[in-house]
Amino acid sequence: MADTESKITSLGKSLAGGDVKAMGQDAINQQVAKNSLFPSLSFKQRIIGFSICAILGVAFGILSFFVILSITTSPARFAVPYSLSTLCLIASTFFLVGPWRQVKTMFHKTRWLTSLILILSFVMVLISAFVIKNAWLVLAFVLVEIGAFTWYALSYIPYARTVIIKFIKHGCRKT
């Protein structure tokens, strides 16, 4: 149990964005609350909110792939749960770091292009489903969105994108 509390405290310090070694629990809670979407929530409640949104995002994602076969007759039937999945997954981080800090990190110099592609592909999935009503366009923009979301997520893992780029370059030289 103490190990779990230590991990949560460490996560809190990381999310607070301050000097991990110098911050006490009260300072962590105040800093995280200041940046949070819901400043009156405790850190534990924020973790619960994050978890609920993330689980809903995964559930909507699974639901969208159950209805993917109907995409040719009704692209919107697939696009709605898929888009809700994306929104829930992005919104889940609002509970941890707050919406403004999330947007700020999304448009950091190393992430802005990926974030822009993610947002544009999200919008194009909806336009392709509701306005153009073209299943192939929906699928194409879903693939672009998945790629952008993956690349965006990898930007938070040190050297992950560098390793993948080197791996791809190495693989291309062999063929």
Image (cartoon, rainbow, N blue to C red):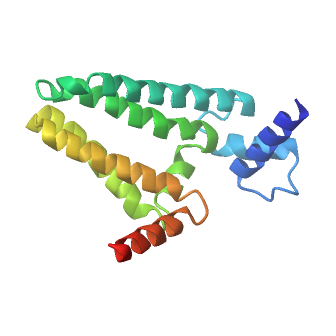
The residue at the point 44 percent across, 56 percent down is: 151
Residue 154 image point, x, y percent: 51, 56
170 w.r.t. 3: above or below = below
Residue 165 image point, x, y percent: 45, 69
Residue at the extreme front: 175
The residue closer to the viewer here, 85 or 27, is 85
Would residue 31 appear left or right of 62 to someone viewing this image?
right
51 w.r.t. 23: above or below = above
53 w.r.t. 15: above or below = above
The residue closer to the viewer here, 61 or 88, is 61
Would residue 131 appear left or right of 153 to someone viewing this image?
left
Asked whether the viewer can see residue 4, the reply is yes
Would residue 62 appear left or right of 37 to someone viewing this image?
left
Q: Quadrant of residue 69?
A: top left
Q: Quadrant of residue 112?
A: bottom left
Residue 34 image point, x, y percent: 68, 44
